[in-house]
Structure formats: C-alpha cells, structure tokens
Image (cartoon, helix red, strand yellow):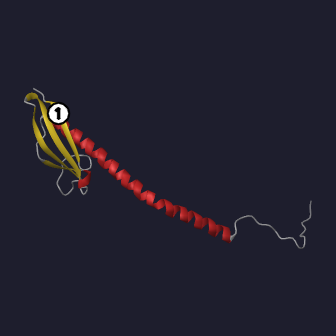
Amino acid sequence: MNSFRIRRGEKKRRGGFSLAEATFSIGLMSFGFLALAPLLGLGMKTSRLARNDRATAQIAQTLIEEARQGTLVPGTVQLDFEGAPCASAQSVYTAQTTSVTPYLANTSLTQMTLRVTPLGAPDRARTYAVVFQTPH
C-alpha cells in the first residue's frame, strides 16, 4: 500500500477551462449565431414561396380537370390550403377563370385561362393557359 504524500511547493493541477476561456468561447459562438440569423429568415421566406408555388400548381391542375369534365363554373373561386372551395373568410387562394372558349373554331378543343393568386401576395399570382379536348 502506498502512502499518500503531499509535496510542498507543488500545485495540484485541475482539468477544465478558465473563466476567460469560457467567456471567449461563448462570445465566439454568439457571434456565429448572430451571423447566421438572417439566413433563417431567408430560408423561411423561400420555403413559404415554394409552398405557395406548389399549391397554386396543384389547384390549377384540379380546376383544369374539373373543366375537362365540364363541372367547372367560370368565375372567381375562394380556396383553402388544400384547394377546396370555402368561404372568403377562410380562403388562402383565389382562382379566377378568365375564359373557357372553343379553340380555333374546333368544337372538340377548348382553351382555358386560369389565374391562381395566394391571398396577400398578388405579385405571386400564376396564370395558366391550357388547351384540352372536351368529351363528346
């Protein structure tokens, strides 16, 4: 069994960080987070715009299918997040059918112009023009 001796004049070394090192590392991490903060806002804006673009394309596809089946009523429709018709108080998108006409005097082809607008973002409106064959 070894005896425990304390030598005089020697400091006992402890592991860990000093207060200055901890303060410096926290300051450095804070500066990094503050530098990256604007990227978070930009990422959220880009995500919202991409979601709106995808939703407007899906809404347009749904309305084009309704026009092909002959069940689409021309005019303005208020739509919710899923593209289902709803009251104007709950609407997130508006879809306006501007024209459904025979194409070049051909009775079996129909031309349709559709404009889908996210509520509160009129500059992000998408216009779709389609020519399709109507059922006989």
Q: Nearer the viewer, residue 58 or 105?
A: 105
**Residue under the point 17% across and 55% down:** 88
- Compared with 94, 7 (above or below) is below
SS class, disc 1: strand
Q: Position of residue 53 (x, y in %)?
A: 30, 46
Q: Is residue 136 left or right of residue 59?
A: left
Amino acid at circle 1: Val
**Residue under the point 21% across and 54% down:** 91
> For mark 1, what is the residue?
131
- Compared with 83, 39 (above or below) is below
Q: Quadrant of the C terminus?
A: top left
Q: Residue furthest bottom?
A: 9
- Compared with 100, 93 (above or below) is below
**Residue under the point 13% across and 44% down:** 98
**Residue under the point 26% across and 51% down:** 124
- Compared with 113, 21 (above or below) is below
Q: Position of residue 43 (x, y in %)?
A: 41, 54
Q: Residue furthest front?
A: 104
Q: Position of residue 69 (x, y in %)?
A: 14, 33
Q: Position of residue 116 (x, y in %)?
A: 21, 47
